[in-house]
Image: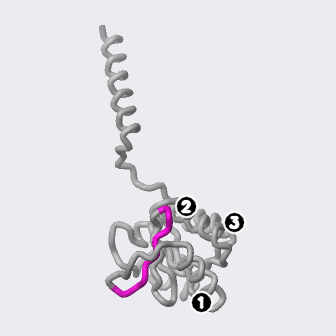
Amino acid sequence: MKKTGSLSALGAIALIASVLLTTGVSDAAPAKWARHSDAAAQFRKAGITSVSSGGCTNWEQRNCTSFTNINKATVSGAIAFKQASRCKVIITGGTEKGHAPGTYSHRNGYKVDMSRGKAVARCLDSYITRTFTYAGKRGDGARMYKSPAGNVYANERSHWDVTYFKARV
């Protein structure tokens, strides 16, 4: 009897799991790169560089650029953007302290800042504004563009504040 009961319980668990998987119900948190160095290696391999005003990567310091606990989808999305746009990408902001709070924030791993410095602005601006759909202005006046994947690129003058919901362009 115990053996049959155990099998029935396992069968019930399998049934529930299959229903949840087929209905798309999931409470799983996004996959993350726990260490800055691991995410930075992925960016470097793709030809994406990063800089910080403090020359540091400590996620507890505002003047650093850190990728500690960045979502893997954010890293993959930025890499896909670089490949599609063929632009030079320089990241000036990641998960470090000092950014606005919120669910889809820098600190929670959803955002990166891409420099609009002289060396890269023309290419980035042209690709984003010609390829993505204008989505209005944020409360701070930043013009937003939405990619086909739903990622949002907001022009904050000195950089593009990019929110990655999906790991693709």
Q: Is residue 144 above or below residue 4?
A: below
Q: Position of residue 130 (x, y in %)?
A: 56, 77
Q: What's under tag 3, amino acid-wise? A: Lys
Alpha carbons under labels 2 and 3: distance apart:
17 Å
Give the label, 2 or 1, closer to the camera.
2
- For the stretch drawn in magenta, the main secondary structure is loop
Q: Position of residue 98 (x, y in %)?
A: 40, 81
Q: Residue at x 63, y 64 (%)?
A: 42
Q: What's under tag 1, amino acid-wise? A: Gly
Residue position for label 1: 117
Identify the secondary structure beneath mark 1: loop
Q: Position of residue 140 (x, y in %)?
A: 35, 86
Q: Residue at x 66, y 77 (%)?
A: 87
Q: How many marks?
A: 3
Q: Is residue 22 above or below residue 43?
A: above
Residue position for label 3: 45
Q: Nearer the viewer, residue 44 or 121?
A: 121
Q: Which mark is residue 38?
A: none
Give, as a single range, the part of the protein colored magenta: 140-149
**Image quarter of residue 55:** bottom right
**Considering only order in the chain, which callout, 1 or 3, is on the residue closer to the N terminus?**
3
Quadrant into which the C terminus falls: bottom right
Residue position for label 2: 168
Q: Position of residue 104 (x, y in %)?
A: 38, 68
Alpha carbons under labels 3 and 1: distance apart:
22 Å
Left or right: 13 with respect to 145? left
